[in-house]
């Protein structure tokens, strides 16, 4: 649940991950509860997982929490590095890219929209 930035977030994620596809999207129209053009409901297919994305029509004080994050296995070091650099830009690095023993390379970040990502290169 975003607060007005869902369209920008979806565009960013689709630019990073080729398997991030918007299957359906309905935006708020003029006169709706939320600003026109913000995302009322989008259905996403991300590596076979179906996700629902919205822009909340009601302002709220809470945000995404790192206790729920998207975990992504990358095919190679270049894919992992690129995804991590783009996602962490303007956000927060919680665990920098490194070998933590459970994978070849791993990083955990929060993107500029507040969504938490665990980016992994499997052993």
Image (cartoon, rainbow, N blue to C red):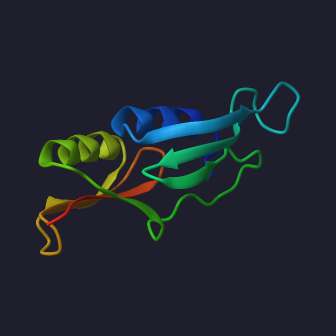
Look at the picture and state if 6 lies above or below 93.
above
Name the one closer to the observer, 36 or 103: 103
Look at the picture and state if 21 lies above or below 74.
above
Number of marks drawn: 0
Q: Position of residue 73 (x, y in %)?
A: 28, 57
Residue 5, can we see it? Answer: no
Instruction: Say which quarter of the image contains residue 18.
Output: top left
Instruction: Say which quarter of the image contains residue 36.
Output: top right
The residue lying furthest to the bottom in this view is 101
Q: Position of residue 101 (x, y in %)?
A: 12, 75
Q: Position of residue 98 (x, y in %)?
A: 13, 62
Instruction: Please give left or right for residue 53 compared with residue 48 in the image.
Output: right
What residue is at 46 percent from the left and 71 percent from the top? Answer: 67
Look at the picture and state if 52 lies above or below 17.
below
What residue is at 71 percent from the left and 47 percent from the top? Answer: 56
Q: Position of residue 85 (x, y in %)?
A: 24, 42
The C terminus lies in quadrant: bottom left
What residue is at 34 percent from the left and 37 percent from the top? Answer: 16
What residue is at 16 percent from the left and 48 percent from the top? Answer: 76
Instruction: Say which quarter of the image contains residue 79.
Output: top left
Residue 55, can we see it? Answer: yes
The residue lying furthest to the right in this view is 31
């Amino acid at each position: 649940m975003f607060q007005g930035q869902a369209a920008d977030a979806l565009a960013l994620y689709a630019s990073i991950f080729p398997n991030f596809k918007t299957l359906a999207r309905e935006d708020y129209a003029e006169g709706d509860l939320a600003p026109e053009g913000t995302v009322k409901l989008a259905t996403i297919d991300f590596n076979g997982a179906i996700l629902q994305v919205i822009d909340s029509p009601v302002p709220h004080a809470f945000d995404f929490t790192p206790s729920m994050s998207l975990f992504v296995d990358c095919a190679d070091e270049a894919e992992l590095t690129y995804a991590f650099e783009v996602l962490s830009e303007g956000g927060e690095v919680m665990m920098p890219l490194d070998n933590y023993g459970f994978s070849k390379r791993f990083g955990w970040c929060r993107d500029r929209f507040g969504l938490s990502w665990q980016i992994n290169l499997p052993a």
